[in-house]
Image (tube, helix red, strand yellow):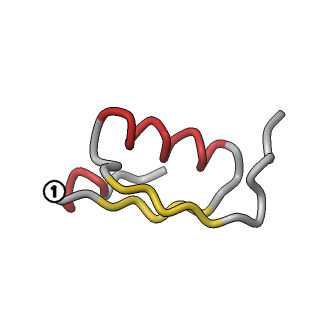
Amino acid sequence: MAGRLSNKVALITGAGSGIGLTAAEVFATEGASVAALDVHGDAAERPP
């Protein structure tokens, strides 16, 4: 069911790799606007 998170904002920490990265990808796929954060900033700066 795509779009379950339309009009929502998600703040994902640890989004540079692992579970955080996967969560950010899934949330974005479901329509959320995602703020991806990681202590290694460049790791979290991947285009959608």
User: Where residue 20 sits: x, y (%)?
Assistant: 38, 43
Residue at the image position 80 percent from the left and 46 percent from the top: 4
Residue at the image position 23 percent from the left and 51 percent from the top: 43
Query: Number of marks in the image?
Result: 1
Q: Is 37 in front, or is 45?
A: 37
Residue at the image position 70 percent from the left and 64 percent from the top: 8
Residue extending farthest to the right is 1
Q: Is 46 in front, or is 10?
A: 10
Q: Residues within 10 Å of mark 1 (few under 14, many from 20)?
A: few
The image quadrant that residue 41 belongs to is bottom left
* Vertical position of residue 38 compared to residue 19: above or below: below
In the image, is 29 to the left or to the right of 25? right
In the image, is 35 to the left or to the right of 46? right
Q: Secondary structure at mark 1?
A: loop
* Vertical position of residue 2 compared to residue 35: above or below: above
Residue that mark 1 sits on: 40
Q: Amino acid at mark 1?
A: His
In the image, is 16 to the left or to the right of 42? right
User: Where residue 10 sits: x, y (%)?
Assistant: 56, 61
User: Where residue 19 sits: x, y (%)?
Assistant: 38, 34
Q: In the picture, which quadrant includes the N terminus? A: top right
Q: Is 32 in front, or is 19?
A: 19
